[in-house]
Image (cartoon, rainbow, N blue to C red):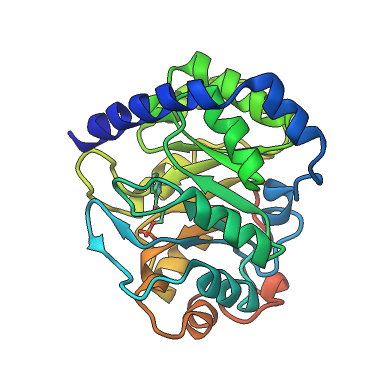
Amino acid sequence: MYLDRIVETKREETAKLAATLSIPQALETIAGMPATKGFAKTLTAGRKRDMGLIAEVKKASPSKGLIRPDFDPVAIALAYEEAGADCLSVLTDAPYFQGSSEYLQAVRQAVNLPLLRKDFVIDERQIYEARILGADAVLLIAAILTPQQISTFMRTAASIGLDSLIEVHSLEEMKTVLELELSEGVLIGINNRNLHTFETSLAASESLGKLVPEGVPFISESGISSVQDMDFLRNTGASGVLIGECFMRQKDIQAAVNALMGPVGSAAKEGGVSIHE
Ligand SMILES: O=P(O)(O)OC[C@@H](O)[C@@H](O)c1c[nH]c2ccccc12
């Protein structure tokens, strides 16, 4: 199963990271860095449209192979910013998604939007590393973490100014996450894609979204590509969406974002603000 293989790879990567990243030193570096940008807040109270958008800088994936051959992460990030994306997600996993830590650093230099480091976090050091690379939030995937790890990692992230996007796909995972004490700055991500089978269905957001209590914002992730999809998701109470592939396949990214999301400033449009806030 490919998720197991990825975790294996991450074990090797984090073993190396243990030799190069010292946490006390990382803390010193972080103390000298500018404050983070409030990833969760930007998507909830601060979003530009009725639905928030995390736009993903994504070159390839294990299920789809190469998605965007002429991949220029900075140009893509600038187009997303110009189109009024609220936040960006940058894949840093190299072996499976052809991402890179350098892409995250380059994007940080180029845009002012809050950034998510998209990777498979299994070790605390990756969280410190994310902060140093310029991220404002980290992804915590429930399928590969124990409840204890999710809890610890969420707190570690918060202690250095990072928000957490906690990703679930199954009912089991959702229940686990809802039992944790979720602090401010935490978003739940409902992944419409099953990371074991690659099957994608927006029904995941509909069924699992119903379980999310008021006051806890959630994002619908993966497999979103049409105005109909967006209309469907508006009715689930999601605060926003995380979209990669559909934009990456378009030549004119800015036009693609506006066609799917509607014009900036549509926050007061029908559907209104999510009931989850
Ligand atoms: O490209 P899509 O189908 O729009 O999906 C984006 C994002 O949700 C997806 O890349 C993703 C969701 N969870 C992940 C975990 C790891 C890597 C990637 C992902």
The percent position of residue 189, horizontal first and vertical second, equals 50, 43
The residue closer to the viewer here, 261 or 29, is 29
The percent position of residue 196, horizontal first and vertical second, equals 23, 38
Q: Is residue 172 visible?
A: no
Placement of 69 over or under 201, stated as above or below: below
The percent position of residue 144, horizontal first and vertical second, equals 37, 26
Placement of 38 over or under 24, stated as above or below: below
Q: Is residue 242 left or right of residue 170?
A: right
Residue drawn at point x = 28 percent, y = 43 percent: 194
The residue closer to the viewer here, 5 or 139, is 5
Residue drawn at point x = 45 percent, y = 71 percent: 72
Q: Is residue 126 visible?
A: yes
The residue closer to the viewer here, 204 or 70, is 70
Q: Is residue 204 left or right of residue 277?
A: left
Residue drawn at point x = 68 percent, y = 38 percent: 162
When asked about the image quadrant of residue 170, the answer is top left
When asked about the image quadrant of residue 187, the answer is top right
Name the quadrant of the N terminus.
Answer: top left
Placement of 227 over or under 177, stated as above or below: below
The residue closer to the viewer here, 32 or 198, is 32
When asked about the image quadrant of residue 218, the answer is top right
